Image (tube, rainbow, N blue to C red):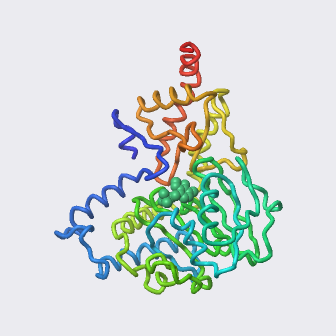
Amino acid sequence: MGQRCSDAAAVISFASGPGVLPPEVLDEVREAVGGWHGHARSILELPFGGAEYTAIQDEFEEDARALLSLPDDYRILLMQGGAFAQFRLVPLNLLRPGERAAYIDTGLWAARAITEAGEVCDVAVAARGCGEIPAVQSWRLPDDAVYCHVTGNETADGIQFHAFPDLGDVPLVADLTADLFTHPLEFRRFGLVYASAQKNLGATGLTVVIVRADLLGRTRAEVPAPLDYTRQAGARSRVNTPPIFSVFVAGRMLKWLRRQGGLRLAAARCRQRSAMLYRAIDDSRLYSCSARPADRSHVSVCFHLPDAARDALFLAEARRRGLVHLEGHPARGGIRACLFNAMPEEGVAALADFMGEFAVTGAACAQHDR
Ligand SMILES: Cc1ncc(COP(=O)(O)O)c(C=O)c1O
């Protein structure tokens, strides 16, 4: 990406997904599509039952386990359908009829998880936070909750759990679509985590589900086999054709992350990059951020200018500089900069510099136009 930044025509995408990829991973993908290990065959032509794909999946799993320090009794499932499908699949796979689960409502994505789960099970909303993560002391978990669902990072609202509570016998189930593999996790607190790959792990089409083995075996009969955690765990995620290309790309991202020093350093980079933007926000009276400072996200920085006209001017001027896909989520408006694993520091520095300049010149310009 350094290359792409130093190029005069460079364009830096702050999209909420797919995220940017490191240049060396893109080179590996190009080579693998062109011809696998120098052979005439492309990665796109590998059968999933063959030795080549088996090796790709084995390496993915080995690298994921090493990065996450994953205990042996957790299974990694490579599925499809995105995190959105998991909103309903989690209760369908973990709850028996009549059982219920607690949910923490922290914003747009938690609300969607609650709505989808509510179609198939009894949901108890144990706490709500608007622009903040509610303190764990305020959570009211029903005694019979089988799990407690949290959203690690609210990508549309710009808030994030920076520590996950230990709820004792009630396992956490977490949507980590925006933050899996961006920081270390104390896995023993979790019964299950899930994440779509296209933010921090590369290409679309892969959903990673990591589940504690003792929670398997509860899937309802109506769940189709490829979406059944128990069947997928038994078949090593090959109940049907897996998303081979996406698993390959995600595998290269995991190797890249290991070369970069693992998840402690990934977390430090996330903090440093987001701090550049929060500094630019706090140093100017033009930008405001509705997230409580302690809960501000390190991977999706959301802010507003004083009115929609100035948001639009900011976006247009940023685009002219090659800083693209900065629009906030359509339900929230404003500006959003997503800083997933492969976002280069120079890209964030360019945005922070632009924000500083715009706070002076752009704001004045908008005042003049009115
Ligand atoms: C926190 C969170 N959960 C779930 C989703 C939905 O992911 P997908 O579109 O892969 O289903 C998103 C998408 O941005 C997200 O940010």
From the viewer's perspective, tell me whether residue 179 is left or right of residue 322: right
Residue at the spot 58% in from the left edge and 69% down from the top edge:
193
| Position of 158 relative to 112 (above/below) | above
| Position of 318 relative to 294 (above/below) | above
Residue at the spot 43% in from the left edge and 72% down from the top edge:
60
Number of numbered discs visible in the structure rendering? 0
- Residue 29, x across and y down, in percent: 31, 60
- Whether residue 28 is visible, yes or no, is yes
From the viewer's perspective, tell me whether residue 48 is left or right of residue 332: left
- Whether residue 200 is visible, yes or no, is no
| Position of 293 relative to 65 (above/below) | above
Q: Nearer the viewer, residue 175 or 269?
A: 175
Tell me which corner region of the image, top left, top right, bottom left or bottom right, holds residue 58.
bottom left
From the viewer's perspective, tell me whether residue 222 is left or right of residue 280: left
Residue extending furthest toward the right: 137
From the viewer's perspective, tell me whether residue 314 is left or right of residue 113: left
Tell me which corner region of the image, top left, top right, bottom left or bottom right, holds residue 152.
bottom right
- Residue 220, x across and y down, in percent: 56, 82
Tell me which corner region of the image, top left, top right, bottom left or bottom right, holds residue 249.
bottom left
| Position of 311 relative to 54 (above/below) | above
Residue extending furthest toward the left: 40
- Residue 201, x across and y down, in percent: 45, 61
Q: Nearer the viewer, residue 307 or 136?
A: 307
| Image quadrant occupied by the C terminus | top right
- Residue 312, x across and y down, in percent: 51, 29
Residue at the spot 61% in from the left edge and 38% down from the top edge:
303
Q: Nearer the viewer, residue 183 or 244?
A: 244
